[in-house]
Image (tube, coloured by chain):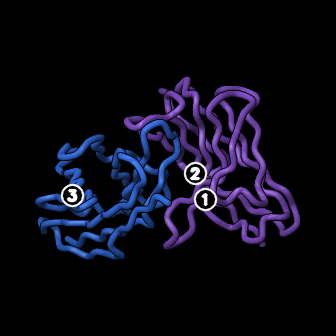
Chain colours: A blue, B purple
């Protein structure tokens, strides 16, 4: 079946460090890919998305590029802030389906 | 403001009792979803509904039930048959019946504790 694999956390960084959170997927079709963020005690918010190969999603300084050849959608940010501390989820959905398949999430902790 | 509301934020119940979690949306979205979140497990789909009076089981539907009598409401009942009901429950919705570009909008969640 379809699945999403994320690097295990927590990822601990100092403020202004470079962030990479790896995400790879397996899918029977041609998926759309998403990154969601969850702040403590809250629901999930869409951070960015990409719907076809080589698309780059970006938002709030975060970026991820849809790489079909490596089945990856790694999340990056050039300079993290303490306020970026949260859990980040990679997810996919297939065309014609309405359900999302999520990775297990990666906790990011940023210290001042 | 449009959005998804879940109530209550925290819920406590005794083992053996059924409990219903509320999910309401005023986004005029067709599809609604229920997820369960456990530490280190990510999100797992319980049930979803693409139109009123219709719903489908997700990956972990056992011990849960839902109804979709109105477009804006999708309540989840956690029954006494659910072996490990303590978890964080998230409701979500999408504008249409899904599709590759439709992201899901999430409510703030309900944390259920059963003792």
- The residue indicated by pointer 3 is A69
Same chain letter for marks 1 and 2: yes
Q: Residue at x 26, y 57 (%)?
A: A73
Q: CB atoms at circles 3 and 2 under 8 Å apart?
A: no
**Horizontal and vertical percent for residue B109?**
57, 51
Helix, strand or loop status at disc 1: strand
Q: Chain of mark 3?
A: A
Residue B72 disc label: none
Q: Chain of mark 2?
A: B
Asked if A112 appears above or below A53 in the picture, the reply is below
Q: Quadrant of residue A23?
A: bottom left
The answer to which of A104 and A84 lies nearer the viewer is: A104
User: What separation in Å lies between label 1 and label 3 (alpha carbons)?
Assistant: 32 Å
Question: Would residue B11 be found to the left or right of residue A97 on screen?
Answer: right
Question: Would residue A87 be found to the left or right of residue B50 on screen?
Answer: left
**Horizontal and vertical percent for residue A26?**
38, 61
Q: Residue furthest front?
A: A28
Helix, strand or loop status at disc 2: strand
Q: CB atoms at circles 1 and 2 under 8 Å apart?
A: yes
For label 2, the crowd category at 10 Å Cα-Cα, with few meaning under 14, some 14 to 19 and many 20 or more, is many
- Quadrant containing the C terminus of chain A is bottom left
- Number of numbered discs: 3
Q: Residue at x 35, y 46 (%)?
A: A30
Residue B90 disc label: 2
Same chain letter for marks 3 and 2: no
Q: Chain of mark 1?
A: B
Asked if A23 appears above or below B66 in the picture, the reply is below
User: What separation in Å lies between label 1 and label 2 (alpha carbons)?
Assistant: 6 Å
- The residue indicated by pointer 1 is B36
Q: Quadrant of residue B97?
A: top right
Question: Would residue A112 be found to the left or right of residue A11 on screen?
Answer: left
- Specify which label sits upstream in the sequence, 1 or 2: 1
């Amino acid at each position: 079946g379809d699945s999403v694999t994320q690097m295990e956390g927590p990822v601990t960084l100092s403020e202004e460090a470079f962030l990479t959170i790896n995400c790879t997927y397996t899918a029977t079709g041609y998926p759309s890919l998403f990154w969601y963020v969850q702040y403590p005690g809250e629901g999930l918010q869409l951070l960015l998305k990409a719907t076809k190969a080589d698309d780059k999603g970006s938002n709030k300084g975060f970026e991820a590029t849809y790489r079909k050849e490596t089945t990856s959608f790694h999340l990056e940010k050039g300079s993290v802030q303490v306020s970026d501390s949260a859990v980040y989820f990679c997810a996919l959905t297939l065309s014609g389906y309405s359900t999302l398949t999520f990775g297990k999430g990666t906790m990011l902790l940023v210290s001042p | 403001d449009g959005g998804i509301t879940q109530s209550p934020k925290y819920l406590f119940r005794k083992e053996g009792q059924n409990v219903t979690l509320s999910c309401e949306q005023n986004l005029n979205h067709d599809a609604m979803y229920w997820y369960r979140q456990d530490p280190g497990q990510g999100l797992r789909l319980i049930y979803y509904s693409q139109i009123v009076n219709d719903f489908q089981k997700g990956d972990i539907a056992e011990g849960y039930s839902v109804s979709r009598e109105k477009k804006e409401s999708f309540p989840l009942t956690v029954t006494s048959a659910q072996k490990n009901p303590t978890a964080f429950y998230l409701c979500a919705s999408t504008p249409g019946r899904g599709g590759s570009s439709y992201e899901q909008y999430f409510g703030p969640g309900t944390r259920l504790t059963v003792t």
